[in-house]
Image (cartoon, rainbow, N blue to C red):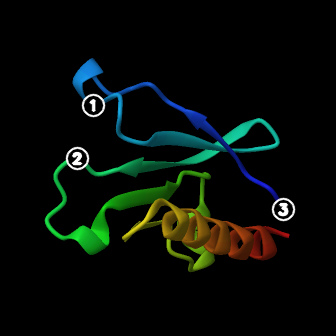
Amino acid sequence: MSLTLRSTKLAPPVYQHTGDYEVLDDGKSIGRIYEIRAPLRLDQLWFWSITVLGAHRAGIHTEGRAPTFEHAKAQFQTNYERWQEWAK
């Protein structure tokens, strides 16, 4: 499965350099991954969330924090795939 990322451009101009992405599966919005502007800890620099209706009922993590963008994408994808298996 390959998820698509699209820049949200929701941040004000001063923060446009930070990463902020909508996550899409086959063109449908399923979540978001963004860089936290003032993290309390560097190992929690990126936030991800799965916004599929009812995903929390699958017993998966629907949100989390990660030290890097790559880790955030991997955590998102792992939990989204678990939700897909549960939803079958």
Question: What amino acid type should be assigned to the residue bearing mark 2?
Answer: Arg
Question: Residue, x 19% and y 59% (percent of image)?
Answer: 39
Q: Earlier in the sequence, mark 1 or mark 3?
A: 3
* Mark sitting on residue 25: none
Tell me how far mark 1 sits from mark 2, CA to CA. Answer: 8 Å
Where residue 48 appears, as percent x and y from the top left, is: 46, 58
Tell me how far mark 2 sits from mark 3, CA to CA. Answer: 30 Å
Q: Earlier in the sequence, mark 2 or mark 3?
A: 3
Quick check: 81 above or below 26? below
Q: Nearer the viewer, mark 1 or mark 3?
A: 1
Going by the picture, which residue comes out furthest to the bottom?
59
* Residues tagged 1 and 3 counted as in contact (Cβ below 8 A): no
Question: Residue, x 44% and y 25% (percent of image)?
Answer: 9
Question: What amino acid type should be assigned to the residue bearing mark 1?
Answer: Tyr
Residue behind mark 1? 15
Residue behind mark 3? 1
Quarter of the figure that contains the C terminus: bottom right
Question: Residue, x 42% and y 42% (percent of image)?
Answer: 19
Q: Residues within 10 Å of mark 3 (few under 14, many from 20)?
A: few
Tell me how far mark 1 sits from mark 3, CA to CA. Answer: 31 Å
Going by the picture, which residue comes out furthest to the top?
13
Residue behind mark 2? 37
Could you say whether the residue bearing mark 2 is in a helix, strand or loop? loop
Where residue 12 appears, as percent x and y from the top left, is: 27, 22
* Residues tagged 1 and 2 counted as in contact (Cβ below 8 A): yes
Where residue 16 appears, as percent x and y from the top left, is: 35, 28
Question: For residue 14, which quarter of the picture?
Answer: top left
